[in-house]
Image (tube, rainbow, N blue to C red):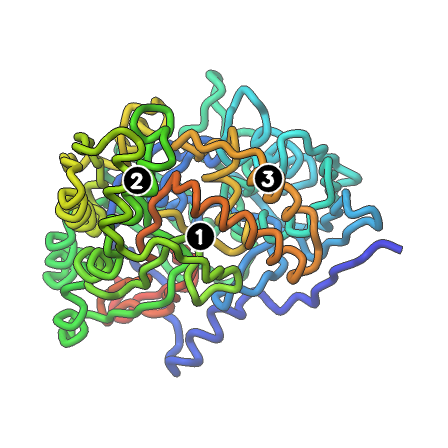
Amino acid sequence: MAKRFIFFVVLVLAFAVNIAAAQDMEPQNGGTLRAAWQSEWESLDPHVASSEATFQVLNNVLETLTFFDNDMNLIPWLAESWERSDDGLTWTFYLREGVLFSNGREMTADDVVWSLQRLIDPEVASGNAWRIGTDTIIEAVDTYTVAITTSAPSATLPASIAANKSIAVMAPESVNDEGFVDVPIGTGPFVIAEVEGTTRILLERNENYWQEGLPYLDAVEITPITDDAARELALEGGEVDWIFTISPQNLEALQADENVIVETSPRLSYDYMGLNLMREPFNDVRVRQAIAYALDRNIICNFAFFGLCEPIQGPTASGTAWYFPYSPYDQNLDMARSLLEEAGYADGFEMTINPVIGFEETIRGAQVIQQQLAAIGITVNVEPEESTIIIEKQGTGEFDALMWSWLGLTDAEDYFYLQHRTGQGFNFTGYSNEEFDALVDEGRTLDSFEERYAVYEQANQILVDDAPYIYLYAKSEVKAWAPSVHGFAVRPDSAVNFWTVWLEGDME
């Protein structure tokens, strides 16, 4: 008999009721929330997008079959229930009936099939196709039933679907005559009403939204303010109502400001320096290990993110279920120099690190790394770039080292697969190890947490030893807003969801 996972659906206002009850205030309807992003977005096509800034916009426009609530529990969303076949290959999802796209057309199984087939279409070349598998078969069983059959058993498919808006349901009408998506049409609480390049997006209330009474806001106006200080001044001065993040060094000052609300949460992410294994000298594992040994991650954490972070040597932090304690790279300058000499670089070499403008912690971290690598003869040039240029460099391979973060990590495969397995879309370092690949492939097929943990523990040790990335720290999630803003939840997966947000005051 098939294993069936059926969930009793709590009425859709659950999030709003919980948040409002905690504040003992009745949510108000109306108003426009002015939100400041940390960086510019890129393509709004969910199958092409790769940046956090883009997906945080799409979180409010597109929806997935399954969803993680604010406590990171997997719950039904566009699918009311799902079941898995006895052989573990086929997941069947039973859709919620009566859900409309923002253009007024009902969502059916055909739309789900089209969305997922486009995700894995080789011509689209989505970096997130791995999440369901490029050879996966997606079929409409009937109007409200979808069957997804993978080539190998996948115990984590429902969670994978919830983890990323690239697997959201999008109306086929979103694609223009040239085959591109300028503005996606979804079932979410907001619609994209206006787009001004990468400088402004206006989200407006979806009048056809299936969750009765939501969203509370009429609109959300999003603009990027990449400088931390300017973003914080905009909030303190009343120019914006909500900001994506704050400078950690200003945390105490902002917490003391009665005109600012600050909340933090542990973050499911890691910050790293990715090395280009496709060019010398980084194609030599001894050079990469030398760099890893030369760094004092405690100093980097304290300087880059002012201590609101945990130093790490692998991709997982101690607060996650997938933490592995293997940590061979405590700072050891003698070992670092010895490895460089063994690799033929006794006199060091010159390299360039590209941190991300708008993510000031990456710039501060790069400056510390610059100083620490000088101790073993490596001359570092720090050249910050806009996020769009960093993404371009990831695609072209025109870099020595890039600094950024990987986030929204809810399962072991999120930590280990997409950025690390051979040939995956976001494996921009060019890392490839057959033993590692075999382990992460196996980990995706297992049901037992204990079995999966043992497999990923082996994969983690291989990865840390090979050092394609220099893992630095896992930082806290920090958001800030005006006291008139209510109902926003700071989440460990960093998701920005505005449909339960409301504004206190005169909305006329």
Q: Which residue is mark 1?
A: 408
Instruction: Say which amino acid is labelled 3.
Output: Arg
Q: Say which of marks 3 and 2 sits in front.
A: 2
**Quadrant of the frame with the C terminus:** bottom left
Q: Are marks 3 and 2 in contact (CB under 8 Å)?
A: no
Secondary structure type for disc 2 = helix
What numbered label is drawn on residue 339? 2
Along the viewing direction, whichever of 495 and 382 lies nearer the viewer: 382
Q: Position of residue 210 (x, y in %)?
A: 56, 54
**Residue sitting at 32 percent across and 47 percent down?**
272
Q: CA distance from mark 3 to mark 1?
A: 31 Å
**Residue sitting at 61 percent across and 57 percent down?**
454
Mark 3 burial class by Cα count in 10 Å: few <14, some 14-19, many 20+:
few
Figure quadrant of residue 21 = bottom left
**Quadrant of the frame with the N terminus:** bottom right
Q: Position of residue 13 (x, y in %)?
A: 53, 68
Mark 2 burial class by Cα count in 10 Å: few <14, some 14-19, many 20+:
many
Q: Is residue 398 left or right of residue 227?
A: right
Q: Which residue is mark 3?
A: 105
Q: CA distance from mark 3 to mark 2?
A: 62 Å
**Residue sitting at 25 percent across and 68 percent down?**
506
Q: Position of residue 418 (x, y in %)?
A: 50, 39
